[in-house]
């Protein structure tokens, strides 16, 4: 057992220290990544300080780009750049010029992918822009597997020698917006979030059809990202490949990524930026710092997104509080979970991006029914209706859940066999989890030792991202226990072995050069 004695001030200082990273000033406000093609596959600017690609094969620099030089990606190309610090999941804009180079047909193919750092899906894709056989599709995947997706038909598709400008903007408080040649082509309909203070609601809009609460929608895009790049069959932490029926390249130019959703006028300027002079292309923007799409870190909009992410969005139902000078928290590890007779190791593995159940091929979740068929990923067709967690033989009184799953948590009788748990009658209901929540905390009035608990899903496929059990009590560690003391300080991580991990964690979250955001 680890006992932490930590003051609030120390914790806050440490958190801010680890999140503050000095980066070079961007050539445009909010710009995170810019690749003009003039330096080949090396970016002109990288907020993460990582302009070189992680994969670079069958890609060459060409002179006849949309503006100056560009990249010609072969059919078997492998091209990707690191995501942390160069792109953020919470909100942003992806902009690039694309040229098909040879005629398109009825067969769909991907134009761009952004990959998870870890996930339950086979293709590991968080963001994708495709040629859909008649135009373009674009989506961003929320933390509970649903996709905010738009589809656009282009009546007169660009000729193989013609450059087309594509932009996808996303914001977990606003949804997504997709542009073709500087014009808004599709947007996910939005509606104010019902539980927000009326003073905030007029500025806060969230995409419809993702998660519902009192008839309104909620979503969380926040997640860990790994790499991004064009065209490939797969871009993931495991590998980057072009193969199978995904053997199709194209040309890419003027790749830009921003830390906020651009407004219509800014997108139009990007699409019409004239001339081959790189310096001129850096001047296409007025400062959008006051735009409602890029709110201040302490704004009510961003505050609500943070509260939603961590389960503090309902003032009338806050996580439980334990008074006293000392608090003992023991993590009760869950090593066995079963969906029907299938042993499971995802919703209890400590990784928020992995889920129970896995991803279905023809999913009921919004935006997931796809024209790129993949095998059902590690789940039965009847999975996703209930899961049983087998707790070890020790006391626990505190459960935390993340994900969109809603339903009830049941306590099963003594002696139930794991493989038969789905068929057993419940002894009692521990709690009910409401629809429309992302992170919830459940404190039991009395500790329970061991036993099995079963979550019954009200809607099949709605996932649990993480389910964790703890024993929380007042007081110090048991007498005679071996202890280890950790001291958090305000300086940056100074151990060489820890620095890369600290930087990766910090770059997952939005920040500005002047401090955390």
Image (cartoon, rainbow, N blue to C red):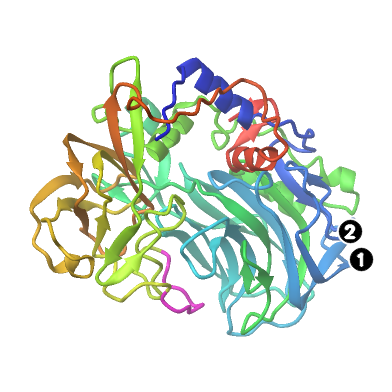
Residue 368 sits inside the magenta stretch = yes
Look at the numbered disc 1 and give the secondary structure of its residue. Answer: loop
Look at the numbered disc 2 and give the secondary structure of its residue. Answer: loop
Q: From this viewpoint, which residue is outermost toward the front? A: 480
Q: Examine the rendering and report whether any part of residue 61 can be seen.
A: yes
Marks 2 and 1 in Cβ contact (< 8 Å): yes
Q: Which residues are magenta?
A: 367-376
In this orientation, which residue lies closer to the viewer: 252 or 322?
Answer: 322
In this orientation, which residue lies closer to the viewer: 410 or 483?
Answer: 483
Residue 482 % position (x, y): 43, 31
- Residue at the (75%, 59%) spot, across then down: 54
Q: Which label sits on residue 68?
A: 2
Image-quadrant location for residue 162: bottom right
Q: Examine the rendering and report whether any part of residue 168 can be seen.
A: no
The Cα–Cα distance between marks 2 and 1, rounded to whole angstroms, is 6 Å
Decide which of tag 2 and tag 1 comes sooner along the chain.
1
In this orientation, which residue lies closer to the viewer: 304 or 162?
Answer: 304
Residue 461 % position (x, y): 31, 64
Residue 199 % position (x, y): 37, 25
Residue 145 sits inside the magenta stretch = no
Residue that badge 1 annotates: 63
């Amino acid at each position: 057992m680890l006992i932490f004695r930590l003051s609030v001030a120390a914790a806050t200082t440490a958190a801010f220290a680890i999140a503050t990273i000095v980066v070079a000033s961007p050539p445009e406000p909010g710009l995170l990544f810019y690749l003009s093609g003039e330096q080949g596959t090396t970016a002109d600017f990288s907020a993460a300080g990582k302009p070189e690609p992680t994969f670079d094969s069958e890609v060459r620099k060409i002179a006849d780009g949309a503006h100056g030089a560009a990249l010609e990606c072969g059919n078997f190309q492998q091209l990707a750049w690191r995501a942390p610090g160069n792109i953020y999941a919470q909100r942003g804009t992806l902009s690039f010029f694309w040229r098909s180079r040879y005629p398109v047909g009825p067969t769909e193919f991907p134009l761009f992918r952004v990959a998870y750092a870890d996930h339950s899906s086979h293709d590991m894709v968080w963001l994708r822009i495709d040629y859909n056989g008649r135009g373009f599709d674009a989506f961003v995947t929320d933390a509970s597997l649903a996709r905010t997706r738009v589809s656009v038909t282009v009546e007169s598709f660009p000729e193989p020698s013609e450059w087309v400008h594509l932009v996808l903007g996303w914001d977990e408080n606003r949804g997504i917006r997709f542009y073709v040649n500087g014009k808004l082509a599709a947007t996910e309909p939005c509606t104010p979030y019902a539980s927000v203070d009326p003073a905030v609601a007029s500025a806060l809009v969230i995409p419809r059809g993702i998660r519902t609460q009192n008839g309104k929608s909620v979503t969380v895009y926040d997640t860990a990202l790994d790499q991004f790049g064009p065209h490939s069959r797969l871009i993931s932490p495991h590998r980057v490949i072009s193969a199978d029926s995904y053997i199709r390249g194209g040309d890419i130019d003027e790749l830009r990524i921003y830390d906020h959703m651009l407004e219509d006028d800014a997108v139009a300027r990007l699409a019409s930026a004239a001339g081959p002079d790189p310096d001129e292309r850096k001047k296409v923007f007025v400062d959008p710092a006051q735009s409602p799409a890029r709110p201040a870190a302490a704004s009510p909009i961003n505050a609500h997104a943070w509260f939603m992410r961590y389960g503090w969005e309902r003032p009338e139902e806050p996580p439980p509080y334990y008074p006293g000078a000392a608090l003992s928290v023991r993590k009760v590890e869950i090593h066995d979970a079963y969906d029907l007779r299938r042993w499971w190791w995802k919703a209890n593995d400590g990784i928020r991006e992995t889920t129970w159940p896995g991803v279905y091929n023809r999913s009921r979740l919004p935006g997931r029914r796809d024209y790129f068929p993949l095998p059902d990923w590690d789940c039965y067709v009847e999975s996703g209706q209930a899961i049983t967690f087998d707790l070890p033989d020790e006391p626990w009184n505190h459960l935390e859940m993340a994900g969109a799953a809603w339903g009830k948590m049941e306590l099963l009788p003594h002696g139930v066999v794991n493989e038969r748990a789905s068929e057993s009658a419940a002894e009692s209901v521990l709690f009910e989890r409401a629809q429309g929540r992302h992170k919830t905390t459940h404190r039991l009035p009395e500790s329970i030792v061991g036993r099995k608990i079963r979550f019954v899903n009200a809607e099949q496929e709605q996932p649990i991202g993480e389910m964790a059990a703890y024993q929380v009590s007042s007081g110090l560690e048991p007498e005679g226990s071996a202890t280890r003391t950790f001291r958090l300080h305000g300086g940056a991580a100074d151990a060489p072995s820890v620095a890369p991990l600290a930087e990766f964690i910090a770059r997952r979250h939005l920040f500005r050069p002047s401090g955390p955001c």
